[in-house]
Amino acid sequence: MWVSAKPMGWKGFKDTRSVGGLNLSEVPQPLKEIPNMRKNISFQYNKEYWKTISEAYERTAKILNKVRWDFVKEIKPKIALDYGAGASFLTKFAPKGITVDSFDLGKFPIKYTGIRHDFYDLVFFCDVLEHFPDFRVLDKLFKKTDHVYVSLPILPDGKKLIGWKHFKFDTGEHLHFFTKRSLDLFFEARGFKLVKSGYPEVECGVRKDIYSALYKKKKIVFVNGVFDLIHIGHTYLFAKAKELGDILVVGLNSDKSAAKIKREPINNQENRKKMLESIEYVDRVEVFDELNPLCLMKKIKPDIVIKGSDYTRKTVIGYEFVESYGGRIVIIPTLEGNSTTEIIEKIKGRSFNKDLPKIKGGYITKGY
């Protein structure tokens, strides 16, 4: 269960009490007003609260942040962002060679660096997701990273929400509560998958009921073509492409597009699309009318673009665009003797025995 509560003083905000961490449709608050949250969320600016949390962080900061950095060490980040940095200890105790920026929508008495980079190897959300009135403010940030570390309260099994230490609806401090599953759904909806999870901040003896999870952005693989008569060469290409990522998107030439670049397809685009969608390796099919898939590629921004061995990297349409944002072109050897053109020629060359019995309703009829 994921529950949202109405924050104190948040004018125009509707109570969205919902399940799954995905329903934000009823949140009308314009994004442009969110930077002014200091006028609306009082708990963040309470001096007594700030003093309490600062003292707690001071006592545990070194060990707590070592645990956090150890949890993400396999990523080997060079540039990280501490988002919602109520304290700057992730920066203070960062391993040597890692640059850490810090940022918070609230007005804490901390000097933040701000979001200075276009891309981060890792973004930390430590004790922050439960505070956001509107998650849409994070949409642009999710595009700036491939990895997210989250730590937040998770209600233990068998424990009631009312009376739980982290249940703070009445103060307006905690606006959301997640389960492990709804947290996964939250990130899946934003294109990330769970890499690892656990309770490292609890196991080190510092905190209670704080769950940690590391998410990685799903890798999009793109392949395009007419795919008129599906054959083993196509399915081989799709299988190899899917091995390289998480989501395989097939760009399909429309009937109009195919007729201009090749020939009029035997199967229309609706049937070709349905056939492709039935293949287990394919996650999504996008039809395009242009002569090449560049406009579609700009919309999708795939991590990997796949082509057969009749191409080289520089003959792939859009290779410069893909490489401009860190994507790459992968050439996969094609299976010889398997092409739509060859299949059509084989069919043309076949003769049919006119003396064979006629078939009606699945049975040989008499008097043929």
Image: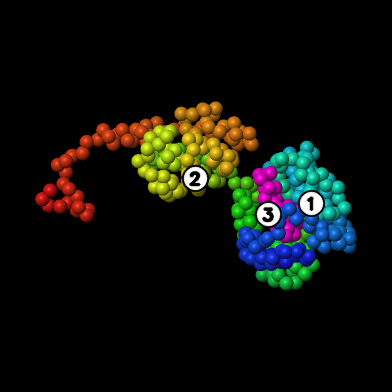
Q: Nearer the viewer, mark 3 or mark 1?
A: 3
Q: What separation in Å lies between label 1 and label 2 (alpha carbons)?
A: 38 Å
Q: Which mark is drawn over residue 286?
A: 2
Q: Which mark is drawn over residue 104?
A: 1
Residue 177 picture location, percent across and down = 69, 63
Q: Earlier in the sequence, mark 3 or mark 1?
A: 1
Q: Nearer the viewer, mark 1 or mark 2?
A: 2
Q: Amino acid at mark 2?
A: Glu
Residue at 38% across / 44% down in the picture?
Answer: 268
Q: Earlier in the sequence, mark 1 or mark 2?
A: 1
Q: Residues within 10 Å of mark 3 (few under 14, many from 20)?
A: some
Residue 145 lies in the magenta stretch = yes
- What are the residue bounds of the magenta stretch? 125-149
Q: Amino acid at mark 1?
A: Asp
- The answer to which image quadrant residue 211 occupies is bottom right
**Residue at numbered disc 3:** 136
Circles 1 and 2: CB atoms closer than 8 Å: no
